[in-house]
Image (cartoon, helix red, strand yellow):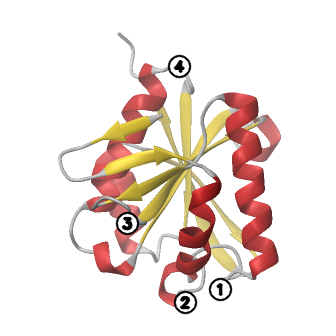
Amino acid sequence: MLITTERLTLHAWSEACFDGLFALAQLPETVRYVGTGEPWSHEYTLAKHRATLTHWTEHGFGWFAVSAAPGSFDGVVSLVRRNATESGLGRPAVEMGWWIAPSGWGRGYATEATTAVRDRAFESGWADRLLAVYEPVNKPSARVVEKLGFTVHSKFVLDGRVEQRAVLERPSS
């Protein structure tokens, strides 16, 4: 599966994505607002990679590798099905997340890539409701959430870090 925008190509996750993911997960500036904020180990990255491949097999959607040029790995836009408990909303949702490599920061890649995936998720029927979980201190991600039309749902503290849930419902026809 392929999604294209004016400047980006988003590829369905595949075995070939591991090396790019691992390289991105080693950058402190990329992971500072994810999980513990520490770079991912090889084993943890491999487990995430395998879970992503399984998610695609089970649900027909999942993570997308972002490329700004042929053969490049410039980030990830993720879609992960969450049940009512996992979502923290009391109802199921598809969680959307993103990482853009620092070389792409300030270029609008995150907004461009996530807008394309958001639209495909709703058009394809993968999701009726999208969820974004982010730290409000991460101003670039907060701006992407706002640009995409998400509405803040709740704040919570996890391991001493303030996180926010925002929701976007499928637009009615």
- The residues bearing labels 3 and 2 have C-alpha atoms spaced at a distance of 20 Å
Q: Mark 1: give few (<14), some (14-19) or many (20+) Cα within 10 Å.
A: many
- Asked whether disc 4 touches disc 1, contact meaning CB atoms under 8 Å apart, the reply is no
Give the residue type at disc 3: Ser
- The residues bearing labels 4 and 1 have C-alpha atoms spaced at a distance of 34 Å
Task: Name the residue carrying label 3.
Answer: 72
Q: Residue furthest top?
A: 173
Q: Quadrant of residue 15?
A: bottom right
Task: Name the residue carrying label 1.
Answer: 39
Disc number for residue 28: 2
Query: Of residues 126 and 145, which is closer to you in this image?
Result: 126
- The residues bearing labels 2 and 4 have C-alpha atoms spaced at a distance of 35 Å
Give the residue type at disc 2: Pro
- Asked whether disc 2 touches disc 4, contact meaning CB atoms under 8 Å apart, the reply is no
- Disc 4 is placed on an element classified as loop
Mark 3 or mark 1: whose residue is earlier in sequence: 1
Disc number for residue 125: 4
Q: Mark 4: give few (<14), some (14-19) or many (20+) Cα within 10 Å.
A: few
Disc number for residue 146: none
Q: Mark 2: give few (<14), some (14-19) or many (20+) Cα within 10 Å.
A: few
